[in-house]
Image: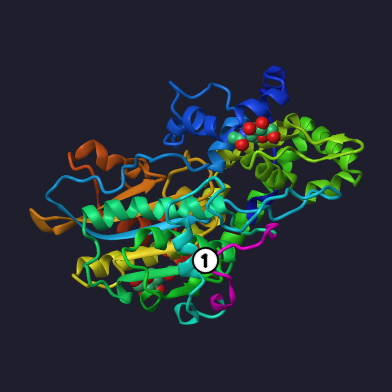
């Protein structure tokens, strides 16, 4: 993952440190039910910072709980909202996999004991959980492109393996699927009753957590999950760039972006001190501790209410967590300002956006295939797409994040098609760079499809600032 090294610094650290004692934070703030009903259920809707209601100083624990996305009662969402004379034509869903076990261990500590089997008497729970397990266990190899057919179809280890989807992750996507089903199938009849395999387009990376997340979402979504009608394609690239992955200029942006991250980290003496302390606790060189990306593991402790690890030298604690998380937030802020990541994103997201508008254009011609597209992906997939669309204020993709493109037809003017863009249930259409201005001129609550097409075909290259107007030229620009 590209951002595994994003750590950074915290200006208001002193203030935060003075805040609440860490045991208080850990045991009283974090209880899942509080996170559900108190801190986060409203705020999780807020993907754009709201100067009126957001705390003036970003609270790292609050941000981390949003990231956990602990399943809660029925979520309200804006998907499918349209005037009644609009007809839903197609839907394109990009998801991040659900809650997973860490990808790294903190050296010389016991890894968190989390059970990745799926059982009814453990929270979080979803009414379809048992049916999901029993249906998955009858899975069919014919439903997957090689090498996906060798992956397990649901998580099943009593001690999670590294990166394995957890029960929380499965429940998050069963919920996403159910929510989309109520809106797109029950309300808007996106698929006919006798829908067939070619009306779905399904694609996933080759990790078990993305495949399983996609299956859980579909299981919640489809009225009858018939293995004969499921076919998942394999996407080798986390950018979903298919045959267009070679792009030297994109790689140059990425190198500069990584250099920026590195320099920001060096400037943060509080962060260096924290890594030093943690390294002493676990008794390894600081470098080794840092390379083990401890925040990934610490987030898992936090999301699962498991206390941070201890050794005979002491405990990793909430203050360490806050310093590292605050640095991450600061890093994201500087990333937006410096725009190197934007350059990377415009080029990185072009192929998948181009594919999506191609699919939309075919649907506008009346083709009935691929009406529902699902891309089961990673933070490093969603993040560049968000950034490329101009949604730079959007929060970093949480577990089970969803980004949705809806295509609509105006029944009163059948030649006109419009799009809506939703991130975690919030309508962000008019925050995108290609539809900000439209908002001011039009009363329609959507964006003309032409705006998106023009953006993907040309304006996203113009936004790079060179003279290129197509992907190939932009990727091979000399002297960048
Ligand atoms: C979190 O863990 C603490 C201590 O182990 C426990 O008292 C608390 O009930 C737990 N909270 C939840 C929501 O499980
Ligand atoms: C964009 O999509 C069109 C088909 O819709 C395809 O012919 C073209 O090669 C794609 N370009 C890139 C750079 O992916």
> 266 or 316: which is nearer to us?
316
Q: Nearer the viewer, residue 57 or 322?
A: 322
What is the residue that sits farthest to the front in this orientation? 121
Looking at the picture, how far across and down is residue 102, in whole percent? Answer: 68, 52
Residue at x-position 50% and y-position 60%: 213
In the figure, is residue 265 to the left or right of 426?
right
Is the CB atom of the residue marked by disc 1 within 8 angstroms of ligand 2's nearest atom? no
For residue 216, side relative to residue 199 (left or right): right
Picture quarter with the C terminus: bottom right
- Ligand 2 resides in the quarter of the picture at bottom left
Residue 374: % across, % down: 40, 63
- Locate residue 301, reporting x and y percent: 68, 42
Q: Is residue 90 above or below residue 392?
A: below
In the image, residue 85 above or below residue 313: below
Number of other residues with Cα within 10 Å of mark 1, as a class: few under 14, some 14 to 19, many 20 or more: many
Residue at the (50%, 48%) spot, across then down: 125
Q: Is residue 349 magenta?
A: no
Q: How many marks?
A: 1
- Kindly tell me whether residue 158 is visible in this rendering: yes
Residue 98 visible to an observer of this rendering: no
Magenta-tinted stretch: 148-161
Q: Which colour assignment does the render follow? A: rainbow
Q: Secondary structure at mark 1?
A: helix
**Quadrant assignment, res 48:** top left
Q: In this view, which residue lies farthest toward the left?
A: 412
**Chief SS of the magenta region:** loop
Q: Which residue is the site of mark 1?
A: 211
Q: How far from the left and from the top, in percent, is residue 266?
A: 77, 39
For the N terminus, the image quarter is bottom right
Does the magenta-highlighted stretch encompass residue 155? yes
Left or right: 353 with respect to 58?
A: left
């Amino acid at each position: 993952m590209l951002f595994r090294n994003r750590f950074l610094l915290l200006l208001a650290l002193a203030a935060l440190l003075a805040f609440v004692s860490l045991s208080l934070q850990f045991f009283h703030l974090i209880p899942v039910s509080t996170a559900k009903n108190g801190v986060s259920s409203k705020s999780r809707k807020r993907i754009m910072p709201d100067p009126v209601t957001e705390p003036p100083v970003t609270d790292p624990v609050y941000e981390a709980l949003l990231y956990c996305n602990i399943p809660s009662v029925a979520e309200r969402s804006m998907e499918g909202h349209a005037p009644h004379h609009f007809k839903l034509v197609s839907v394109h869903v990009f998801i991040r996999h659900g809650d997973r076990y860490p990808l790294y261990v903190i050296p010389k500590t016991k890894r968190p004991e989390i059970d990745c089997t799926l059982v009814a008497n453990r929270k979080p729970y979803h009414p379809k959980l048992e049916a999901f397990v029993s249906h998955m266990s009858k899975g069919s190899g014919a439903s997957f492109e090689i090498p996906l057919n060798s992956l397990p179809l649901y998580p099943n280890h009593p001690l999670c393996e590294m990166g394995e989807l957890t029960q929380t992750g499965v429940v998050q996507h069963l919920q996403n699927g159910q929510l989309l089903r109520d809106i797109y199938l029950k309300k808007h009849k996106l698929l006919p009753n006798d829908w067939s395999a070619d009306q779905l387009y399904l694609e996933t990376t080759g990790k078990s957590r993305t495949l399983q997340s996609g299956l859980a979402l579909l299981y919640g979504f489809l009225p009858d999950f018939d293995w004969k009608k499921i076919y998942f394609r394999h996407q080798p690239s986390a950018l979903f760039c298919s045959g267009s992955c070679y792009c030297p200029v994109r790689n140059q942006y990425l190198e500069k972006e990584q250099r920026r991250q590195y320099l920001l980290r060096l400037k943060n003496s509080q962060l260096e001190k924290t890594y030093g302390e943690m390294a002493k606790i676990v008794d390894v060189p600081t470098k080794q501790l840092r390379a083990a990306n401890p925040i990934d593991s610490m987030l898992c402790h936090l999301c699962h209410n498991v206390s941070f690890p201890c050794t005979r030298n002491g405990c990793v604690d909430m203050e360490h967590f806050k310093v590292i998380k605050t640095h991450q937030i600061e890093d994201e802020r500087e990333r937006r300002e410096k725009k190197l990541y934007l350059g990377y994103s415009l080029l990185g997201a072009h192929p998948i956006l181009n594919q999506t508008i191609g699919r939309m254009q075919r649907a506008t011609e009346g083709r009935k295939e691929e009406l529902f597209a699902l891309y089961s992906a990673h933070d490093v997939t969603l993040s560049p797409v968000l950034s490329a669309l101009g949604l730079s204020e959007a929060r970093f993709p949480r577990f089970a994040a969803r980004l949705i493109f809806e295509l609509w037809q105006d029944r009163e003017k059948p030649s006109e098609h419009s799009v809506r863009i939703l991130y975690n249930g919030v309508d962000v259409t008019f925050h995108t760079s290609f539809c900000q201005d439209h908002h001011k001129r039009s009363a329609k609550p959507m964006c003309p499809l032409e705006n998106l097409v023009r953006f993907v075909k040309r304006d996203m290259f113009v936004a790079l600032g060179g003279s290129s107007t197509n992907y190939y030229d932009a990727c091979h620009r000399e002297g960048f």
